[in-house]
Image (spheres, helix red, strand yellow):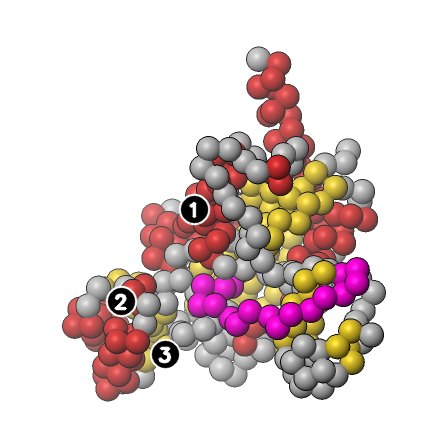
Amino acid sequence: MSVHIGILYSRIRRDEKLLLTELRERGHEVTKIDVRKETFDISEASETFADLDLVVDRCLATSRSLYATKFCDAYGVPVVNSNETADICADKVKNSLALEAAGVPTPATKVAFTKESALEAIESFGYPCVLKPVVGSWGRLMAKVDSRSAAEAILEHKATLGHYEHKVFYVQEFVDKPGRDIRVLAVDGEPIAAMARSSEHWLTNAAKGAETAAFDLDEEALDLVQKASDAVGGGLLGVDLMEAGDSYTVHEVNHTVEFKALDDAVDVDVPGAVVDWLEAQADAGTDDHELEVTA
Amino acid sequence: MTQCVECGADLSLHDDLEAGEIVDCTTCGAELEVIDTEPPVLERAPELEEDWGE
């Protein structure tokens, strides 16, 4: 069955291109929605949103993702990922709180609002520890803090030069991972594929140039991915785990997950599996709508 | 032939060009956004914003 899918975007990365190609090859109608060109009326949807079975949020900018998905909700257009999921995943504080509340092992984290209290949090962890921006991606503006003098300098820079969000100090224990972390692409907690991202640098983001290789998930990891997905409301997610001793810790869940590096690293047809899931979501949305009309 | 808006060099573009895509100028290294595909129209790509990511 052919469906009509809207793609919210402001930049077509290779990830979006893989999705577009797969959707079109399967005969689905695709409407690209450049959010930079849209205006969102609070009372009614523009023509762009008419007749869409499903919207896929692929906004590059977190702020746009949060508002655009909220408008999709208001317009009654099914959207993945949901605004609720985006809201949690977009913010590292909310992300950590959700994982902790769900009993998912996650690095010890403290949040402080002043340089002084942040320094107390840092000293409570000892050195090294990690300072992260609450909003951000690709390993940018992450600081591994090795000493009190470095901590003081970083905090002053963040407080003086940063956007107000940089005055929300997110302090985390340093996890001594074995030179790699694990990215799992999952749909409602069901993994499509996983890869290890390895680097000699403490940051192992693929965007930072980490080497990638397919990774087989064991039962414990599978269970954690399901729990982490549930904790943020499910959807098409990138769950990041670190090996900690003989167990794992989940450091974050990403809601507009990139998968080009994963597609290169594994034998699985990643965009194909993503589109399988999108088709199921679109069908479910259509069925719900038909039920409402019948009722 | 489409030219780089930054340095004027001729650009060799692939066939499955997509509006919103970024192409690099192999001469000057500029990142260029595809504004339209038929015919190709390119503009200098926006600078990285702090909240960009996944």
Q: The residue under label 3 is which amino acid type?
A: Lys
Judged left or right of residue A35, residue B18 is right
Q: CA distance from mark 1 to mark 2?
A: 26 Å
Task: Please report, as a chain letter, where disc 3 is located.
Answer: A
Q: Which residue is mark 1?
A: A231
Compared to A91, does A148 lie above or below? below
Q: CA distance from mark 2 to mark 3?
A: 17 Å
| Along the viewing direction, whichever of A173 and B49 lies nearer the viewer | B49
Q: Which residue is mark 3?
A: A144
Question: Which residue extends farthest top?
Answer: A295
* Magenta portion: prevailing SS class: loop
Of the numbered discs 1 and 2, the one sitting upstream in the chain is 2
Task: Please report, as a chain letter, where disc 1 is located.
Answer: A
Q: Which residue is mark 2?
A: A167
Q: Residue at x 42, y 49 (%)?
A: A87
Compared to A45, does A86 lie above or below? below
**Residue B43 magenta:** yes
